[in-house]
Amino acid sequence: MREIVLINITGVDRPGLTAAITGVLAQGGVNILDIGQAVIHDTLSFGILVEIPDSEQAKAVLKDILFKGYELDQQVRFTPVSEEDYQQWVGNQGKKRHIVTLLTRKVTAGQLQAVSSITAKYGLNIDHIDRLSGRMPLDTPEDKGKGCIEFSVRGEAADPQALRAEFLSVAQELNVDIAFQEDSLFRRNRRLAVFDMDSTLIEAEVIDELAKAAGVGEQVSAITERAMAGELDFRASFKERLALLKGLDVSVLDSIGASLRLTEGAETLFAELKRLGYKTAILSGGFTYFAKQLQARLGIDYVFANELEVVDGKCTGVAIEPIVDAQRKADLLKELAHKEGLRLEQTIAVGDGANDLPMLAIAGLGVAFRAKPLVKQSAKQAISTLGLDGVLYLLGFRDRDGEL
């Protein structure tokens, strides 16, 4: 009678251990049903589910494994598995899988407890946990830390909307980000990433900086704030703000452009996306003049933004049509995906304002980055704690995968 046994081996990791254990199993004519191995701080955890043709043979094989484990200074544990339990496990493989990603400056036990409790509450079982972020020195400053833990979970959430709402609530409470997405083929097969510019790729709203130079900073900033929060129509508010810039000398554009700072993680993100073969684009309600500067700096493929009308070296307070508003951004994302021969599921969109929501909604991965509450609640995913390179974690990218 055949035996199904789960073999667990733990101890100090050493070269050749896996070969030694599987060598013993090979001599016993054993079939491998499942296998998994992880090393944490040089400590090995190795699990292997085996099928042994008959009971007598099983005794001999397991005895040899026990001796080999002792020889290698490993702890060995055997757990019999019934055929009924095995068949039930096989039947579960068709269940949906999701990825829960925790992003934070410093990983704590409380954060992991919160995430694991919520997944269990909604009927999801954690199959695998992995650290995507690199190892951080103990004395890393609080604002320079970077932590990401990825949970692979199985099952169908009892109430997906309530699950997302609870993740969002806990994320705000613990000052972390928690992403929840289906573990589909498209997750690792995305090839186009589009970005808002102001307050996304750069740490400023350019129109506000222009307004300061024109002496109307407070007026324009107040309108910008309400527009980004979704309280005002973007197109109408954009025209209103632009009109206040009438007469501004275009010479100030160079000095403002030189002072703009890239958002944390932008250079890392674009370098990795380029290395991975992605096409990238800026889809901005800001201005082409500044977007072109970013294009040259970051190696961006496409730029779509607004053109300032200039006459005799002065801004007229009018933008040249078509204005890149919320709907235009969504339309451009569709056009670029079609041009690159991609499905929308293969696209990423990142932005911070209400005018980004339509493109975030149709992208395969829509990320609200350091966004206003309305945008954060409406988007599929949100990142507020880390820099732009946190987007890579949502793709399953590990720090050790990078070349930077």
Image: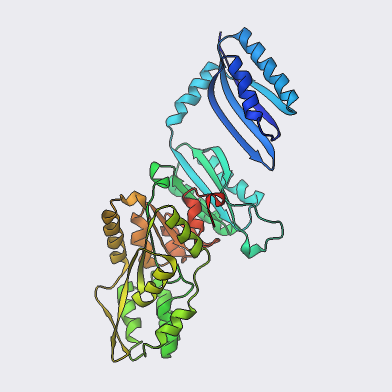
Q: Quadrant of the C terminus?
A: bottom right
Task: Look at 51% across and 57% down and name the residue there.
Answer: 390
Classify residue 349 by image quadrant: bottom left
Looking at the image, which residue sits at the far left? 321
Is residue 53 or residue 369 the one in the foreground? 53
Left or right: where does residue 101 sit relative to residue 297?
Answer: right
Task: Look at 48% across and 77% down and name the residue there.
Answer: 260
Question: Is residue 81 visible in the rendered structure shown here?
Answer: yes
Q: Where in the figure is residue 394, as x and y percent of width and height?
A: 48, 51
Classify residue 257 by image quadrant: bottom left
Classify residue 173 by image quadrant: bottom right
Question: Is residue 157 visible in the rendered structure shown here?
Answer: no
Left or right: where does residue 236 sit relative to residue 96?
Answer: left
Q: Where in the figure is residue 375, as x and y percent of width and height?
A: 42, 63
Task: Look at 30% across and 50% down and name the residue there.
Answer: 342
Total marks shown come to 0
Task: Look at 44% across and 66% down and name the residue there.
Answer: 298
Left or right: where does residue 173 sit relative to residue 42?
Answer: left
**Compared with residue 259, is residue 185 higher up or lower down, i.e. above or below?**
above
Q: Where in the figure is residue 126, as x and y percent of width and height?
A: 55, 38
